[in-house]
Image (cartoon, helix red, strand yellow):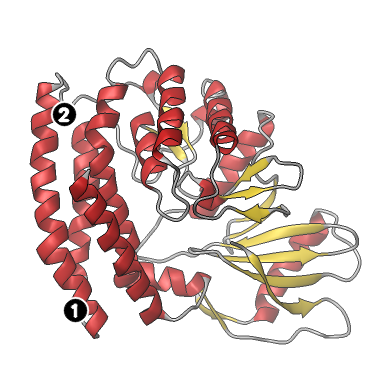
Amino acid sequence: MIKALSVVWIAFCGGIKPRRCLDYRGFMNDIELYNIALPLLKDIGLKGEISITHLSGGMNNRVFKAQGRGKAFLLKLYFTSSKDLRDRGSTEFSFCNFAWKNGIKSVPEPYIFDSKNHLGVYEFIEGSSFKAGSIERRHVDAAVDFFLSLNACRDTDLAKALPPASEACFSIDQHITCIDKRVSRLNQIKIASDIDNEAHSFVSNRLIPFWLELKERVIEDADSFGLDVSYLLPEQLRCVSPSDFGFHNALLQSDGSIRFFDFEYAGWDDPAKAVCDFFFQPAVPVPEALCRRFAAAVLDIFKEDDGLNKRIQLLRRLYGVKWCCIILNEFLAVDSKRRSFACGSDLALRKSTQLSKAANLLSQLQDF
């Protein structure tokens, strides 16, 4: 959930109080960030006294509410690292631009993006976050409509200009390799505390053995399904994917409509991956029956893909392992820095919470 913490700058009477905050260049104080944001806000017509409020809830980036005379915008400062060269800001801004120019208004309207400083300005959306256990059929139907609308436009020039999604996979081999890399990265956990030692033990004694067995089974099952693991999905069977798609990245507005956000990993991908991620996203789980409803809708959109249903069946548990790895990102240096950049909360507590979540998910996968 994104909520206000405090007003950190106000654009009048010199009322800008510096506060040191970790960002992509090391440290930037509030005045520096304010000086970057102010010209952008003026360019899009924000007038009067401008206050900028830091919002909590972002897990990878820092977000702010800019309030002027009768209008508000969202500022998003994207994390960057020399060890992770993905251009999250450009990806998200381009995706929202693609959606809005095709009449898809269930994403934030994009206004301006400062590529030099990795700062985007978007529509500020008022709404309530979804909670675990709150997802109903009408909510999933809204997600289906959104996904359908995106892919009804996949032949447009703007869609063709979109990049592959982050970690896009177009063959079963690529799916396996992608998750193999994530599991291998967890061998890099540096043991500096008891909780690090617990995580290392969990990865070595539970996650890796399960993954090695599952990987072999997926290859065997692909053969029994008549699927070639090296077959590349042709372009016409690929989808425009929001990536990291689920109700953890959605707001329910007062009129009952749903707005989706956070598209920094979006792009072209295998629709089977979009379905599997929707199944396993752990923050706001979707009931099994409603996941099947989403899967059925995607199968209908891509009915010409004879192998899609087989790939979904084949890859489901595999993507459960991927989400175990994502949950454990707190134990990896770059990912932990990104979390600290975004929310700055207690690292030891985050690690303990995430290890418990990963263990629970793996137990579910073993019983699946």
Circle 1: element type = helix
Q: Residue under label 1, please give it.
A: 197
Q: Residue under label 2, please give it.
A: 229
Picture quarter with the C terminus: top left
> Which amino acid, by three-letter code, is at mark 2?
Val
Q: Tell me: residue 180, above or below residue 202.
A: above
Circle 2: element type = loop
Expressed as whole percent of the image width and height from the top left, the position of residue 58 reads 55, 64
**Circles 1, 2 touching at the beta carbon (< 8 Å):** no
Q: Is residue 262 visible?
A: no
Horizontally, residue 349 falls left or right of residue 324, namely right
User: On residue 169, which mark appears?
Assistant: none
* Viewer-side residue, 368 vs 153: 368
Expressed as whole percent of the image width and height from the top left, the position of residue 345 reads 48, 78
Picture quarter with the N terminus: bottom right
Expressed as whole percent of the image width and height from the top left, the position of residue 245 reads 47, 44
> Which amino acid, by three-letter code, is at mark 1?
Asn
* Viewer-side residue, 350 vs 48: 350
* Other-residue count near label 1 (Cα within 10 Å), few / some / many at <14 / 14–19 / ≥20: some
Residue at the spot 21% in from the left edge and 53% down from the top edge: 181
Q: Tell me: residue 364, above or below residue 292.
A: below
Expressed as whole percent of the image width and height from the top left, the position of residue 105 reads 69, 36
